[in-house]
Image (tube, helix red, strand yellow):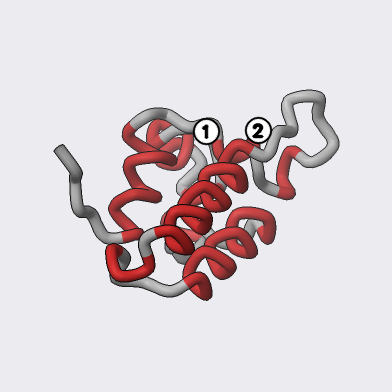
Amino acid sequence: MAVNRPAPTMVSADTEVNNHTSSSSSSAVAATGLQDSPIFLQFLDGVHQLMHQFPSHFEFTPHLLTFLADAAYSAQYGTFICNADYERVMERVKLHTCSV
């Protein structure tokens, strides 16, 4: 069964609900650590590959994927700072940044 979700919902599910470690796996915040890994970028690449195979099945363009990749590595959006919702609340990320 296919689940049709808009891109922001997919990103939210990937980064927040599943406790995807955003800062340790993709962002510039942890670029110097050993835990640096491109998991989120690989996710975006997978979505991009699917967009090429099934272009009429998506309600967004590759430009959104590029924006999300840039946002994840710029460390200026609260969505990609910290590793979990709890950490974002404790660091008061919403008060200091915008979210995607």
Furthest toward the front, the residue is 53
The residue that appears at 61% across and 47% down in the rendered structure is: 41
- Name which of mark 1 and mark 2 comes first in the sequence: 2
- From the viewer's side, name the closer residue of 91 and 36: 36
- The quadrant of the rendering that contains the C terminus is bottom left
**Position above or below: 77 against 3:** below
| Quarter of the rendering containing residue 2 | top left
Residue that numbered label 2 is attached to: 24
The residue that appears at 85% across and 36% down in the rendered structure is: 32
The residue that appears at 56% across and 39% down in the rendered structure is: 22
SS of the residue under disc 2: helix
- The quadrant of the rendering that contains the N terminus is top left
- The image position of residue 14, as x and y in percent, is 40, 39
Give the amino acid type for the residue marked by disc 1 in the picture. Answer: Asn
- From the viewer's side, name the closer residue of 90 and 98: 98
Q: Is residue 71 left or right of residue 9?
A: right
Furthest toward the top, the residue is 34
**Position above or below: 31 against 97:** above
Total residue callouts: 2
- The image position of residue 9, as x and y in percent, is 29, 53
Mark 1 nearby-residue class (10 Å; few <14, some 14–19, many ≥20):
some
The residue that appears at 46% across and 41% down in the rendered structure is: 88
**Position above or below: 24 against 6:** above
Q: Is residue 32 left or right of residue 89?
A: right
- Decide: marks 1, 2 in contact (CB < 8 A)? yes
Residue that numbered label 1 is attached to: 83
Dot label at residue 45: none
SS of the residue under disc 1: loop
- From the viewer's side, name the closer residue of 27 and 43: 43
Q: Is residue 4 left or right of residue 91?
A: left
